[in-house]
Image (cartoon, rainbow, N blue to C red):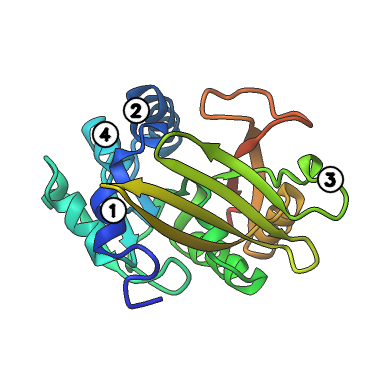
Amino acid sequence: MHDDGLFDEKIAATYDDDKGISAPEVIEPAVDLLAELAGGGRALEFAIGTGRIALPLARKGVQVEGIELSRPMVSRLRAKEGGAEISVAIGDMVTTDVARRFSLVYLVFNTINNLTSQDAQLACFRNAAAHLEPGGHFLIEVGVPPLQRLPVGETILAFDHGETHWGVDEYDVVNQNFSSHHIWLRDGSYERFSVPFRYAWPAEFDLMARLAGLRLKERWGGWKKELFTQVSEKHVSVWQKVEG
């Protein structure tokens, strides 16, 4: 771990190469829903990264700002068309205050799990609420813990296996933590990268929201407002700041 968190220059350089998160069919539904929730107001993205969501959202006319810990990720954002116009505060999403209020704060692609303690996740909810106007919305996109797929006593689940990349998640179900391990084959050499996470169930996030003065408004199984069911692999949840 260093000042840029886990996302150093090497990770930032290839972050957008993953078509699973950068393809238009992935980006467009997310941007459409976020623009709808912003409702003509300003939006703040926690962990704005390379701007893969923020830039197309700005192109839809939403005034977007961001918070990001990793300077290399922000450098990638700045190098893109329109990236220089987006205000980004360098810092973590738990304590950084941009001193403005927004109609929408959002946090996508499992990034809430990068906060590896319950206290940190709760503090993130409270920081989101502090940045919201009364009646504003906080949205997160995060996977549902896939523990139903774990055989009793097992701790490892593979999530990718291809020609040049292998990925496995290693679960600690006692402490509600897991690590994602990646191995890449690049130029004839193997590279390994591991990221620690903390998982939480939707009900726990709802309690964090209530403690932060937010109330659940919507929960979908995806960005196209799919029904959230017992077999949904992720949820897109929206909480609203209580007015008054």
Q: Is residue 151 visible?
A: yes
Distance between the Cα atoms at labels 3 and 2?
A: 33 Å
First in sequence: mark 4 vs mark 2: 2
Residue 179's place in the image compared with 90, above or below, is above
Query: How many labels, in total?
Result: 4
Q: Which percent across, then down, holds residue 47?
A: 38, 57
Q: Nearer the viewer, residue 1 or 128?
A: 1
The residue where tag 3 is placed is: 151
Q: Nearer the viewer, residue 137 or 165?
A: 165
Disc nearest the viewer among 4 and 2: 2
Local secondary structure at mark 3:
loop
Q: Which percent across, then down, holds residue 66?
A: 31, 56
Give the residue type at disc 1: Glu
The residue where tag 4 is placed is: 56
Q: Which percent across, then down, holds residue 139?
A: 52, 45
The residue where tag 2 is placed is: 23
